[in-house]
Amino acid sequence: MIFFYFLYKHVSIRDNAESSILYKCENFEEAECNRLFNILIKKQFFLVLWRLPNNFFKQFFDYYGALLSYALQFIPIIMIGTYDDKSPADLAQIVSNNAFIYIYLVNSFTRLTDLAIDVGEMAGVFQRIADFVHYSDEQAQRGTEVEGLANQSFEEGYGRPPIFVDRTVSPIRLSEGLLFEMKNVSYTLPNDDNYLLMNNLNIRLLKGQNLLVTGPSGAGKSSFLRILMRLWNLKTGMLTYGITSDRILHCPQKAYFPVGKLSLRQQIAFPVHIPNGGNDFRDSGFFERILKDLKLFHLVERCGGFDANVEFDWHETLTPGELQRLAFVRLLYHRPILAILDEATNSVSSDMEKVMYELLLANDISFISAGHRETLKAYHSLELKIDGKTGYSIKELSTNEKL
């Protein structure tokens, strides 16, 4: 099974290559791949040791059975002289009869060794079936409980003062409060330099401002965010940041949660790698409150706590809305100066969207959002509207538009 986990990990990285790049998680993924590889090597080593006796006797009897049937008769005929009184004709008959019996016995031993190997493989199949049945029973019993927990109301409101993560971070000096600035920026598709997506874009975003990127479907909103994250190259112009890249965090529409039986704590801390037994939450109470605010506290019980290694794949078990809310918990854990949100709330309700953006504002996190909902204007001060024809317009959002 560990071999398939190892393969699945690499398939997952390939399928989520863009998200991995945007999260800058190459060190994390390398550590996880090495961890799974070391487990695989260890399992294979013990498997070889377990199979060695069976394979030895199987091969020995297969290739040396006939020779052994005659070698065994060397002792009574030559060394002990049991048949010295027999004539050559009788001795030949005795040797022939004994050889037949010995070969039959060797064949029986060969069947036993083959049976032992088959029984071992069958035991592995039975173990997987038993695990599947046990997991199915657990899910059937847990389904009603989880649904009840997910729908329960939480009493904590948002009148409290801003909550900050108690983590030691190096202060970043903003260049005149600048987050980023684009001057005469034009860009194309990476694989087609003639397909112009944007022409001569000029925009400047300062600390305290939040930008909303709008436009029809296919206009190039996600392309603009890829340019911001420097995933794509500019054709012309200049992109300047007033902050370092490690203080920018991207939150895609389909949040990325790496596979590998990772704990809830590790998924929140991603792409930071927490060693086994490590506790990187200086204030677990903060995360408990955030999980309650986002109606995700049932995940703590479902996962068996913050540090238990789960037996499910996060992106296959959780709903899209739960994944997007958990991605926001990750944002609040890292507390970047700038968060880039690519339709990161389109799978949650408007009420939950309000909760999520208020948490970002309360924690002094600037953000750039791409989306279609009119309700998003309430949390942004600037709107960049992309028309899909290499053009754009920028306007400040008035108080009336935010209401």
Image: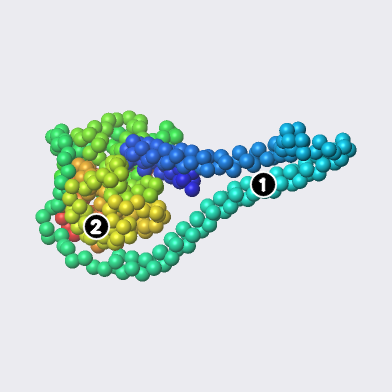
Q: Residue at x 42, y 41 (%)?
A: 39
For the image shown, how many numbered marks are present on the structure? 2
Viewed as shown, does residue 329 lie left or right of 45? Answer: left
**Label 2: few (<14), some (14–19) or many (≥20) C-alpha neighbours in 10 Å:** some
Viewed as shown, does residue 159 lie left or right of 39? Answer: left
65 and 125: which is toward the camera:
65
The structure's colour scheme is rainbow
Viewed as shown, does residue 109 lie left or right of 149? Answer: right
- For label 1, the residue is 109
Three-letter amino acid code at disc 1? Phe
- For label 2, the residue is 291
Q: Residue at x 36, y 37 (%)?
A: 31
- Residue 61 seen in render: yes
| Coordinates of residue 159 in the picture (x, y in percent) | 12, 60
| Coordinates of residue 313 in the picture (x, y in percent) | 40, 52
Q: Earlier in the sequence, mark 2 or mark 1?
A: 1
| Coordinates of residue 65 in the picture (x, y in percent) | 71, 39
Looking at this view, name the residue that lies furthest to the left.
Answer: 161
370 and 28: which is toward the camera:
28
**Label 1: few (<14), some (14–19) or many (≥20) C-alpha neighbours in 10 Å:** some
The quadrant in which the C terminus is found is bottom left
Viewed as shown, does residue 270 lie left or right of 172? Answer: right
Quadrant of res 58: top right
Three-letter amino acid code at disc 2? Leu
- Give the Cα distance between marks 2 and 1: 62 Å
Q: Residue at x 18, y 66 (%)?
A: 155
| Pointers 2 and 1 in contact (C-beta within 8 Å) | no
358 and 397: which is toward the camera:
358
